[in-house]
Image (cartoon, rainbow, N blue to C red):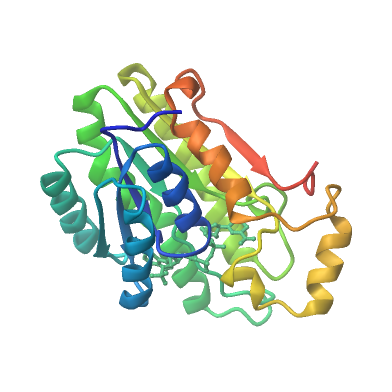
C-alpha cells in the first residue's frame, strides 16, 4: 500500500478508530487532515503523533452534522492540501436507550452526526472526486446496522442508513473511478465501548467467535486496504470487522 502524495480527510480522527486509521494511512505516506469536535488539545496530541510519520498533518474543528460549517472545512482542506484523495467518515456518537425511554432529541442527535454527517461530507467532496475521476470514500457503519441491537434503535438506524448511502453513492460514482465502501466493526475497544460495565464487556466477549475484543488497528487495516490502489475494483461493499460476531 502506498499513499504518497495523497491526502486523507478523517472525521473524528483524533482518537479511537479514526486515529488508528490516520496512523495507518500516514505510515504509508498519506497527508492527513483530521477533523475534531471535542478536545482541541487531544487533537493537537494526535497531530504531533501523526507528524512523526513525516507527512503533512493538520487538524480542523468540524462538527460534521453542521452542513455549512463542514462545507467550509472541506473547502479549506481542498485549498491548503491542494486536493482530497480519501474521505473517511468515521465520526459517530451513541445515545443508547430502549425506544420506550428514547426521546426525539436522542434519535435526532445520533442521526444528525452519524448519518447526516456522512452525507454532508460526501456531498461537499462529491464534485471534487467526480472531476478528479479518482478517489476513495470509506464510511464506518457497524454490525448493528446489519443485525440491529436492543437499546440502539437510533444508532442502528444511522448505521443501516450509512450502508444505503454507501451503496447508492457507489453506484453514482463507479464510472468516475471513485470507490465508496463501508466497514462494519463489531465490538472494538475504544472510548465508545469503555463506558460499558465489565459485566456487559465480558458478556459481549463471550459471544465473539474470535474470543477477543477488536482493536482500532483491526479496523484501520481493512479501511487502509479499501483506500488502496489494490482495492480499485471493490465498491459498494460493506466489510464486517467483528471477529465473526455477526456471522
Ligand atoms: P470514539 O467515541 O472513541 O470516537 C468518536 C469520534 O467521533 C471522536 O473522534 C469524535 O471527535 C468524533 N465525533 C463525534 N461527534 C462528532 C461530530 N459531531 N463531528 C465530528 N466528529 C465527531 O469512538 P470509536 O473510535 O469507537 O468510533 C469511531 C466510529 O466507529 C464511530 O462511527 C462508531 O460509531 C463506529 N463504531 C465503533 C464501534 C466500537 O465498538 N468502538 C463498533 C462499530 C462502529 P472528538 O474526538 O473531537 O470528540
Task: Mark yes or no: residue 116 visible.
Answer: yes
> Residue at image x 47%, y 49%?
21
Q: Position of residue 204 (x, y in %)?
A: 81, 64
Closer-to-camera residue (187/108) = 187
Q: Position of residue 72 (x, y in %)?
A: 16, 57
Where is the C terminus found, in terms of image quarters?
top right
Direction from residue 59 to residue 94 in the image, left or right: right
Direction from residue 81 to residue 179 in the image, left or right: right
> Residue at image x 49%, y 26%?
235
Residue 154 vertical placement versus 220 (above, below): below
Direction from residue 100 to residue 176 in the image, left or right: left
Direction from residue 168 to residue 160 in the image, left or right: right
Outermost residue, left side: 79
> Residue at image x 50%, y 68%?
93
Task: Mark yes or no: residue 64 visible.
Answer: no
Closer-to-camera residue (104/58) = 58
Residue 84 vertical placement versus 206 (above, below): above
Q: Position of residue 26 (x, y in %)?
A: 38, 45
> Residue at image x 24%, y 46%?
124
- Count of marks overlaid on the render: 0
Residue 158 vertical placement versus 152 (above, below): above
Q: Position of residue 90 (x, y in %)?
A: 45, 54
Amino acid at each position: 500500500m502506498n499513499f504518497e502524495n495523497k491526502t486523507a480527510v478523517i472525521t473524528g480522527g483524533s482518537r479511537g478508530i479514526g486515529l488508528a486509521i490516520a496512523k495507518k494511512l500516514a505510515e504509508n505516506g498519506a497527508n492527513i487532515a483530521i477533523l475534531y469536535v471535542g478536545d482541541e488539545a487531544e487533537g493537537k496530541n494526535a497531530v504531533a503523533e501523526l507528524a512523526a510519520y513525516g507527512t503533512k498533518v493538520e487538524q480542523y474543528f468540524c462538527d460534521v452534522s453542521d452542513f455549512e460549517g463542514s462545507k467550509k472545512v472541506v473547502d479549506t482542506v481542498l485549498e491548503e492540501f491542494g486536493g482530497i484523495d480519501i474521505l473517511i467518515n468515521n465520526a459517530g456518537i451513541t445515545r443508547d436507550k430502549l425506544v420506550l425511554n428514547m426521546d426525539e432529541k436522542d434519535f435526532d442527535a445520533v442521526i444528525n452526526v452519524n448519518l447526516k454527517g456522512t452525507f454532508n461530507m460526501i456531498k461537499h467532496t462529491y464534485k471534487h472526486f467526480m472531476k478528479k475521476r479518482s478517489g476513495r470514500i470509506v464510511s464506518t457503519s457497524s454490525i448493528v446496522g446489519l443485525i440491529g441491537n436492543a437499546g440502539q434503535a437510533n444508532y442502528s438506524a444511522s448505521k443501516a442508513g450509512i450502508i444505503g448511502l454507501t451503496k447508492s453513492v457507489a453506484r453514482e460514482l463507479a464510472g468516475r473511478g471513485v470507490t465508496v465502501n463501508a466497514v462494519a466493526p463489531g465490538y472494538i475497544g475504544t472510548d465508545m465501548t469503555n463506558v460499558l460495565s465489565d459485566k456487559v464487556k465480558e458478556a459481549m466477549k463471550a459471544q465473539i467467535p474470535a474470543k477477543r475484543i477488536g482493536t482500532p488497528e483491526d479496523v484501520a487495516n481493512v479501511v487502509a486496504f479499501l483506500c488502496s490502489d489494490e482495492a480499485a475494483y471493490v465498491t459498494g461493499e460493506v466489510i464486517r470487522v467483528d471477529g465473526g460476531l455477526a456471522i
